Amino acid sequence: MAPALAAFGTMQVFDQNWLLVSEVPTSKAYASVNTLIATVSALALMAIPILFLIATRLARSATRPILHITDTAEAIAAGDLNRSMPHIEKPIELKRLADSFGRMRDAVRDQLSQINANVAAIEEKNAQLEEADRMKDTFLANTSHELRTPLNGIVGISETLTAGAAGDLSERQRSQLQLITFSARKLSRLVDDLLDLYRIRQGRCVWICTRSTWPPACATCCCCLSRCYAANP
């Protein structure tokens, strides 16, 4: 016997109570419900792939501008300051973000251009200063060489005259010749110092290390210091 749904109730007819019973098979009673459930299930199964595709498309459309901005930002960080920013209109937040990145790129590019220009100017000035310094050293070296020969000649002539090669000298003349000799030797030492400084700057100075005793070394140092003190008291 197939399952059924039953309903009953009492009813008075001609002063008699009658019991009314009604039975309906469950398949017939739930037919409309089962049809509705099947329809809803079919619609749900059909809607799930459609909703998935719609959600995927919406997600891609939402993340595509972010990916473009991210790629552009990474390219700018890597040094590609000529990379163009993606054109984004919506949403407004991403548009503002892209515009901010564009302004930042332009500011960094302008600053780098200014820095490169300043570096080029500094390098040019350094080259000019190095050339001027080289010309100064060359001038000092040439001048020192030109002064050295006549100074040595002056020292030699004054010493010869002091020794009496040209005849007897008075005390005043001898004192003047000694002063000339002293001044010429001092100038000669200054010229030698200039030449030594030029050789040191050119890297052509040769250091010769020899054994020495303390007294001569101390005497040499005291002599050099006394000369420096006499020149700059």
Image (cartoon, rainbow, N blue to C red):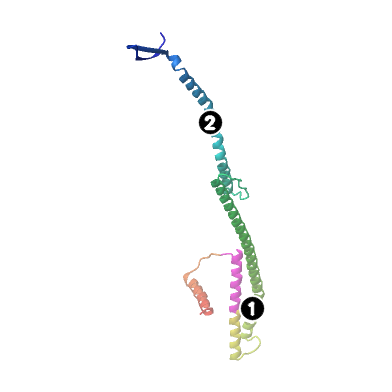
Q: Which mark is residue 58?
A: none
**Residue that carries the numbered disc 1 in the rendered image:** 151
Q: Is residue 33 left or right of residue 79?
A: left
Q: Name the kind of residue labelled 1 in the image.
A: Leu
- Within-10-Å neighbours for mark 2: few <14, some 14–19, many 20+: few
Q: Quadrant of the N terminus?
A: top left
The x and y percentages for residue 211 are 51, 66
The residue drawn where x is 56% and y is 41% is: 67
In the picture shown, does residue 11 fall above or below 93?
Answer: above
Q: Name the kind of residue labelled 2 in the image.
A: Leu
Q: Which mark is in front, 1 or 2?
A: 2
Magenta part mainly helix, strand or loop? helix
Determine the CA span between mark 1 and mark 2.
105 Å
Which quarter of the figure has residue 124? bottom right
- As helix, strand or loop, the secondary structure at mark 1 comes to helix
- As helix, strand or loop, the secondary structure at mark 2 comes to helix
Which quarter of the figure has residue 49? top right
Residue closer to the observer: 203 or 150: 203
Residue closer to the observer: 175 or 162: 175
Q: How many marks?
A: 2
In magenta stretch: residue 205: yes
Q: Earlier in the sequence, mark 1 or mark 2?
A: 2
The x and y percentages for residue 101 are 57, 50
Residue closer to the observer: 225 or 181: 225
The x and y percentages for residue 220 are 51, 73
**Residue that carries the numbered disc 2 in the rendered image:** 51
The residue drawn where x is 56% and y is 35% is: 57
Q: Which residues are magenta?
A: 185-207
